[in-house]
Amino acid sequence: MSASVSLAPEVTPATAETFPIRHRWTVNEFQRMGETGFLNPEARLELIAGELFEMAPIGSFHAGTVNILNRLFMRLVADTAIVDSQNPIVLDDHSEPQPDIALLRPRPDYYLKAHPRAEDVLLLIEVSDSTVQFDRKTKVPLYARHGIPEVWLVVGPQRRHIEVYRYPQPEHGGYQTRLHVGEGALTPLLLPEVEIRLSELFID
């Protein structure tokens, strides 16, 4: 006589709900994607806090202002700084922005061996036409957190002025001083011999 066996219903353990995980890119991954052709070489991308941002198209005000700033600084800084234009700055393992103008500490290799880092920067400049809110709310706090000593936002083309951010407070992600300059001249804190006259920058 066979005995009947009663089987208890199988209990399936509760599973935790899962969500898609956002990947936080590193500078090394970003650079490797560019080197291997994974990224479109025509794409203008910058890495900020692990996220890839496509940079806005360059309008005529933006391009012309960068050209003027390049010319003015190249004429004025001589050997006291390297004038760098729209090239990467490595801030940490997850951020590699490309400011429009960077004045860098002189180095014999002209940064051939490695991109400049935060400690190499004397002044960063962003030309903000269609990107002013992003620059104010995202890039300026990023620069402050990494101790960039001074940032200029050149705002235009309608109400043309420069927002000057000085004395970073990394723990707060902000700057102690913010100036709004629409006329006269500006001198970078760390380059006291350099004077940029706004009449030469904001030309008709």
Image (spheres, rainbow, N blue to C red):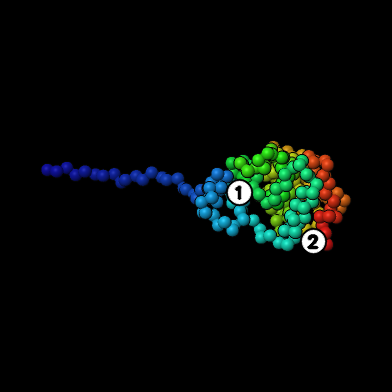
Neighbour tally class for label 1: few under 14, some 14-19, many 20 plus, Cα within 10 Å: many
The percent position of residue 100, horizontal first and vertical second, equals: 70, 51
Q: Residue at x 72, y 44 (%)?
A: 82
In the foreground, 36 or 113:
113
- Three-letter amino acid code of the residue under disc 2: Gln
Neighbour tally class for label 2: few under 14, some 14-19, many 20 plus, Cα within 10 Å: few
Residue 47: mark: 1
The percent position of residue 24, horizontal first and vertical second, equals: 55, 46
First in sequence: mark 2 or mark 1?
Answer: 1
**Label 2 to label 1: alpha-carbon separation:** 29 Å
Q: Residue at x 65, y 42 (%)?
A: 111
The percent position of residue 2, horizontal first and vertical second, equals: 14, 43
- Left or right: 32, with 10 as reference point: right
Whether residue 155 appears in this view of the structure is: no
- Identify residue for label 2: 158
Query: Measured along the vertical axis of the image, is residue 77 above or below residue 66?
Result: above
- Left or right: 37, with 116 as reference point: left
- Left or right: 52, with 138 as reference point: left
Q: Quadrant of the N terminus?
A: top left
